[in-house]
Amino acid sequence: MKTKYLGLTLKHPVVSSASPLAQNIDGVRRLEDAGAAAIVLPSLFEEQIEHESLHLHRTLQQGTESFAEATSYLPEPERFIVGPEEYLNLIAQAKSMCHVPIIASLNGKSPGSWAEYAKQMEQAGADALELNIYYLATDINMTSAQVEDNYINILRAVKSEVKIPVSLKLGPYFSAFAAMAKRCDDAGANGLVLFNRFYQPDLDIEELEVRPHVELSTSLEIRLPLRWLAILHGNLKCNMAATSGVHTHEDAIKLLMAGADVVMMCSALYQWGVRRLGRLAEEIEDWMGEHGYESLDVLRGSMSQRSVADPSAFERANYMKSLQSFKSLA
């Protein structure tokens, strides 16, 4: 069940993804006790680093009543889970009290001095860094090439600050995702995390406000990372992690067969509790034993595009077959 991810040897491939479950040391220890092979801490945001709470508060107050939805764009400073200094303390505490790898998380949208904070995370003891770029290109004059360049520039800025491995958490919305993944790999990403979920806001038509809207994932959401993992496996030097929709051992096994090095869990832990981490690892091991897989190395990538008899099943032929085979329930 051992696997390698970001240069780290993990006892099994089930990792706790970035979430408020690890917002304090008690939460981190609960995740370790529950069986997480590694723990990704919740993200520290670019906005938190570049603005101290008072300055950010003043910035948010300027002109917030000028149009209806502005007041709901950003949370009040005190509603952030932790501030920059508290985050460094959390890393240091986690490293001193836990035995599993601790992966820090930075969430940014533009190159800037905030990237220097990665070095402080490294100095605090982080074993690796997950770079979560949450950027929605709303400028109609910005081209896809400029969007991609922005991602690469952020990655390079962070990589220039640290020696620890850096993974890049991506969304799927690129014109040519395979080429973008290759660019990230060539730019020095040690891992890719597929995929970031872009949370869609809702509108309150009575209060005329934008409302944040978060829904927990379901197993159906593994289909998107499943496809791209299978296409990319064997074509990149970096590791690949699967996230979004990992709830059952079947979900995890499919993603590992497609080429994932690890699977990350969040929503399932909120639904069934953190003990789901260890149970999932046990269920994967039991399934492997029942089906004659001696190690994860044998399992991993066994259903990737390179390994299946019909690679076109991952491409346009699968689209055509799906439509032609669908039968109405009416």
Image (cartoon, grey):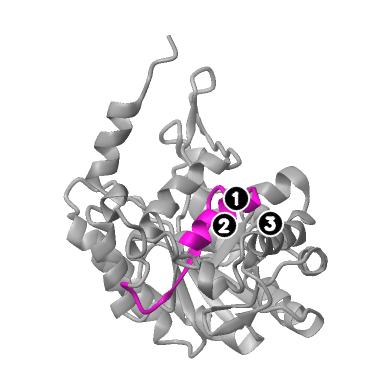
Q: Nearer the viewer, residue 38 or 65?
A: 38
Examine the rendering and report whether any part of residue 73 can be seen. no
SS class, disc 3: helix
**The magenta stretch spans residue 250:** yes
Q: Which mark is residue 253?
A: 2
How dense is the environment of label 2, judged by Cα within 10 Å: few (below 14), some, or many (20 and up)?
A: many
Q: Nearer the viewer, residue 167 or 256?
A: 256
**How far separated are the C-alphas under marks 3 and 2?**
26 Å
Which residue is painted at 64% across and 49% down in the image?
Answer: 248
Q: Is residue 134 left or right of residue 320?
A: right
Magenta highlight range: 235-257
Amino acid type shown at disc 3: Pro
The x, y position of residue 37, in whole percent, is 69, 71
SS class, disc 2: helix
- Whether pointer 3 and pointer 2 mark residues with C-beta atoms closer than 8 Å, the reply is no
SS class, disc 1: helix
The answer to which quarter of the image holds residue 103 is bottom right
How dense is the environment of label 1, judged by Cα within 10 Å: few (below 14), some, or many (20 and up)?
A: some
Q: Earlier in the sequence, mark 3 or mark 2?
A: 3
The x, y position of residue 23, in whole percent, is 71, 62
Which residue is painted at 28% across and 35% down in the image?
Answer: 321
Q: Which residue is mark 3?
A: 20
Which residue is painted at 66% across and 58% down in the image?
Answer: 287
- Whether pointer 2 and pointer 1 mark residues with C-beta atoms closer than 8 Å, the reply is yes
